Amino acid sequence: MQQLNVLANVSDSCPLSCSYCYAGEKSGEVMSDEVLARMVELIQGRENVGSTTYIWHGAEPLAVGKRFFESVRREQSRFDHRVRNGMQSSGVLLTPSFADVLVANEINLGLSLDGPNELHNQMRPFRTGGGSFDQVMRSIDLMRERGKKPGVIAVLTKMSLPYLDDMYDFFKSTGLNFKISPILDCGFAEDKGTDLQLTLDERVQAITHLFDRWFFDEQDGHIIDYENMRTLTRAIFTKGGGSCDMMHNCQDAFISVEVNGDVYPCSRFGDFSYGNIFDVDSFEDILAYPLRQQVLGRFDGIPECVACEYNFLCYSGCMHNAYLVGDIMDKDPNCDANRRIYDHISERVLAELERDGAIGG
Ligand SMILES: C[S@@+](CC[C@H](N)C(=O)[O-])C[C@H]1O[C@@H](n2cnc3c(N)ncnc32)[C@H](O)[C@@H]1O
Ligand code: SF4
Ligand code: SF4
């Protein structure tokens, strides 16, 4: 396996209780030094070693403390191996000295920010009450003061629908790279049901509206840094190369390790574990897990997807979405909505190229 992305859940503890969260506060445990050392040893000791990107995740990764991230670099440097480190965090536990540790250890920070103050605070409160917007903005400032620009991720829910333009304008005003991703129907989000979930029509309308805002917008001749629109548009026109839900098999590039060393296909899965890192002798034993071997054949086993005009882009979509509605081996239940979104983007881009005379009318 050449390029590997490891989603490492280092903490089951979190000070927030976001209304949709699939992770959140569980056991309160954090990853031990022993689990960290075994994980790094297996991953960086693998055959056909390429580069590895670790994405430090959780519930809340900062809850594991600064010392852990100093140990990370020590463990990684025992191997002659190219690594990159990223972190996805709520940002509320970031202090100036923790920001120094992240910068010193070259850990790129991504933050969760759901939009302007009112919307963010409604969706992402502390467990003890009160919104977390001010703390996230402070974390952004702490990183900027150190010459870093964190990327931000927003979750799109039914509550966001009246604020789509406000969200777009807000993210644009930050000057940060941003992603806006629709809510997944799992974790707390499952309990909230239709209060937060988007219907397929709402999903299509919201995403195509946001696409149009981005596509027809530019600032000083530069296209705005709206990451998932840029990735999707590029993938449609370069025939592939999108995000994890647009790969021939995401399992060729991703793996997730939990606090206790259990291995999962990705961090979204609450069950469906492949096994545990202490029960194998090598990374090749992880690759050989029977459940992993089974999901590798998913796309090729769905005739409708193999014959689909968007197969090069979608490859049957996210297997976690399929798992949530019944069978991991099925196609993504958002198939119809996704096709309408791909159609919309293709039509917009082609119309623009024709208007500019770049292609014949
Ligand atoms: C589970 S959190 C863990 C890291 C950290 N605590 C944070 O909030 O960034 C990772 C990302 O998943 C998002 N997320 C959580 N539950 C979700 C759901 N049901 N649907 C879509 N995204 C979700 C969060 O907003 C966050 O951006
Ligand atoms: S999204 Fe992140 S910050 Fe919010 S409850 Fe879940 S783990 Fe905590
Ligand atoms: S768009 Fe639908 S049919 Fe086409 S590959 Fe994706 S999931 Fe399969």
Image (cartoon, rainbow, N blue to C red):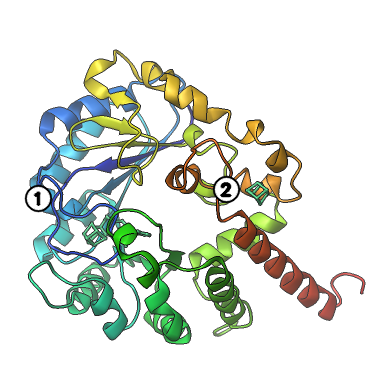
User: Residue 134 lies in what quarter of the image?
Assistant: bottom left
Q: Is residue 21 rendered to the left or right of residue 101? A: right
**Quadrant of the image occupied by residue 347:** bottom right
When asked about the image quadrant of residue 123, the answer is: bottom left
| Residue 332 % position (x, y) | 55, 48
**How far across and down, in percent of the image, does residue 248 sit?**
60, 38
Secondary structure of the residue carrying tag 1 is: loop
Q: What residue is at 21 percent from the left and 25 percent from the top?
A: 38
Position of residue 239 relative to residue 259, above or below, is below
Relative to 245, 302 lies left or right: right
Asked whether, in this view, residue 173 is left or right of residue 201, the answer is left
Is residue 175 visible in the rendered image? The answer is no
Q: Specify the quadrant that holds the C terminus.
A: bottom right
The residue under label 1 is 65
* Residue 221 in picture, x, y percent from top left: 60, 82
Residue, far top: 281
Work out whether 313 lies above or below 137. Answer: above
Vertical placement of residue 186 versus 272, above or below? below
Horizontal and vertical percent position of residue 328: 49, 38
Residue that appears at 57% across and 33% down = 298
Q: Say which of 275 and 330 sits in front.
A: 330
Q: Is 108 or 229 nearer to us in this picture?
A: 229
Q: Is residue 144 visible?
A: yes
